[in-house]
Amino acid sequence: LAKTTQPISMDSYEGQEVNITCSHNNIATNDYITWYQQFPSQGPRFIIQGYKTKVTNEVASLFIPADRKSSTLSLPRVSLSDTAVYYCLVGDILGAGSYQLTFGKGTKLSVIP
Amino acid sequence: ETGVTQTPRHLVMGMTNKKSLKCEQHLGHNAMYWYKQSAKKPLELMFVYNFKEQTENNSVPSRFSPECPNSSHLFLHLHTLQPEDSALYLCASSQEEVASADTQYFGPGTRLTVL
C-alpha cells in the first residue's frame, strides 16, 4: 500500500508553472522523497529527490516543509512534452527488514496548448 | 538511455508457450527489480534481487520465474501464462536495495500480450 497521496490528475496550459503536492503523513525519519515521471509505455524516469527544505535541478524543484509530511514538485514553464504521470514515493519497509519503493497511482498531468 | 536495457520490447505469446524476458544493466548496480504495470494500474513490484540473491517475492504466481545469474543480468521466465498477465513488464536497477535514497533506473519495458 502506497504511503503517499497525490491528486489523480491536473491540467495546465503551456508556459505555466505547475505544482503537484504529495501527502506523506507517516514518513519515517530515514525516508527520502523521490519523484518519478512516466510517459506512456515507457519506464519511470527519476526527476528529483530530497530530504528537507528545497532541492532544485535542471528540470524541477522540490519543496519540503519542516514537518516533512508533504512535498511539492514544481515544474517551471511546462511544455506539451511534460504531459506524463508523476509519482511521489517514499520508502516502505517490508517484512524481514527489507525496503522497497511503492508506486501509487500518480498524478496525470495534461499540458494544454 | 538509462543504462538499463530490456529485450524483447514487444512479445506476443500463447498460453502454452514458454518465453523469457531479459534485462541488462550497465550501471554497476547491485540490486535489480521486476515490476508489472497493467493498464490503468500502479506499478506492482514482483521480485527483488540484491547482490544476486532474491530478497522479495510479492506473492507472484509460479508461472513467473525470475533468474539472476549475476548482478548485471536479470531474467523473467514465463510459462503457461493467462490473458490477464498481459502488461508492461519493467526492469529496474539501483545501487543497493536497502536505502530510501537509492534511485531506481528503469528500462524501457517489454509489452507482453498473452493470447
Image (tube, rainbow, N blue to C red):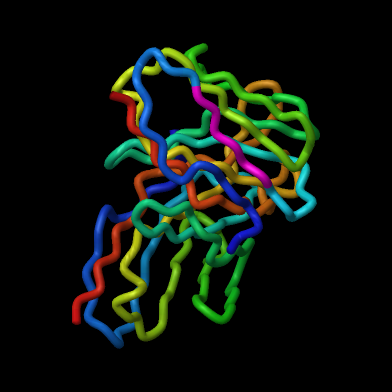
Residue A53 in which image quadrant: bottom right
Residue at image point 39% right, 13% down:
B16
Q: Is residue B59 above or below residue A7?
A: above
Residue at the spot 41% in from the left edge and 42% down from the top edge? B10
The residue sitting at 67% across, 45% down in the picture is B24
Taking depth in this image into account, of A51 and B37 the one nearest to the observer is B37
Looking at the rendering, the stretch of residues picked out in magenta corresponds to: B19-24
Task: Say which of A97 and B64 sits in front.
Answer: B64
A51 lies above or below A26: below
Main secondary structure along the magenta-highlighted residues: strand
Corner quadrant of residue B33? top right
Is A108 part of what is drawn in magenta? no
Q: Is residue A57 left or right of residue B51?
A: left
In percent of width and height, residue B6 lies at: 56, 45
The x and y percentages for residue A67 are: 55, 59
| Residue B76 sits in quarter | top right
